[in-house]
Image (cartoon, grey):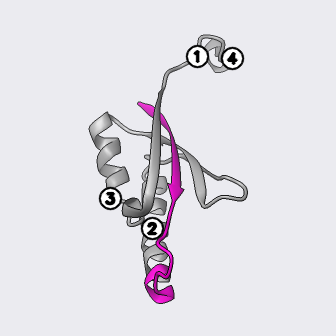
Amino acid sequence: MRYHVRMDVHLPAGIDPQECAELVAREKKYSQGLQRAGKWPHIWRIVGEYANFSIFDVDSNDELHQLLSGLPLFPYMTIHVTPLAVHPSDIALAD
């Protein structure tokens, strides 16, 4: 099952710079592990925002929730999930 996910990060004002750097490093390690595993095949930064658009490819809603809630930055995020379905006009279907 594929999902389009928008993640907006809202770090608290005055967060300790060292704590922030450690949090971001943990986030990068976790997300890159999911990318290598094929669960998070695409991620794009949204220009001018601390946000991204991502595509997840997972087995269920529950798995997606588990992966997203495991993000170190999850407590500081607003997340919008859109389930995706194959479009009948997709030329890849003709192959």
Residue topped by disc 3? 70
Label 3 or label 1, whichever lies nearer to me, is 3
> Distance between the Cα atoms at labels 3 and 4?
35 Å
Mark 1 or mark 2: which comes first in sequence? Answer: 2
Which residue reaches farthest right? 47
Q: Residues within 10 Å of mark 1 (few under 14, many from 20)?
A: few
Q: Which residues are magenta?
A: 1-20
Q: Please identify the quadrant where the C terminus is shown.
A: top right
As measured in the structure, the alpha-carbon distance from the residue carrying label 4 to the one carrying label 2 is: 35 Å
**On the image, numbered disc 1 is attached to which residue?**
87
- Quarter holding residue 33: bottom left
**Magenta includes 2?**
yes
Tag 1: residue type? His
The quadrant of the image that shows the N terminus is: top left
Q: Secondary structure at mark 1?
A: loop
Q: Position of residue 10 (x, y in %)?
A: 50, 63
Q: Residue at x 27, y 39 (%)?
A: 62
Q: What residue is pinned by disc 4? A: 91
**Foreground of the two, 29 or 15:** 15
Kind of element beneath mark 4: helix
Q: Closer to us: mark 3 or mark 4?
A: 3
Indicate the amino acid at tag 2: Glu
Give coordinates of residue 50: x percent, y percent: 60, 61
> Which disc, if any, is residue 69?
none
Of the residues tagged 4 and 2, which is closer to the observer?
2
When asked about the image quadrant of residue 74, the answer is: bottom left
Which badge, 3 or 2, comes first in the chain's sequence? Answer: 2
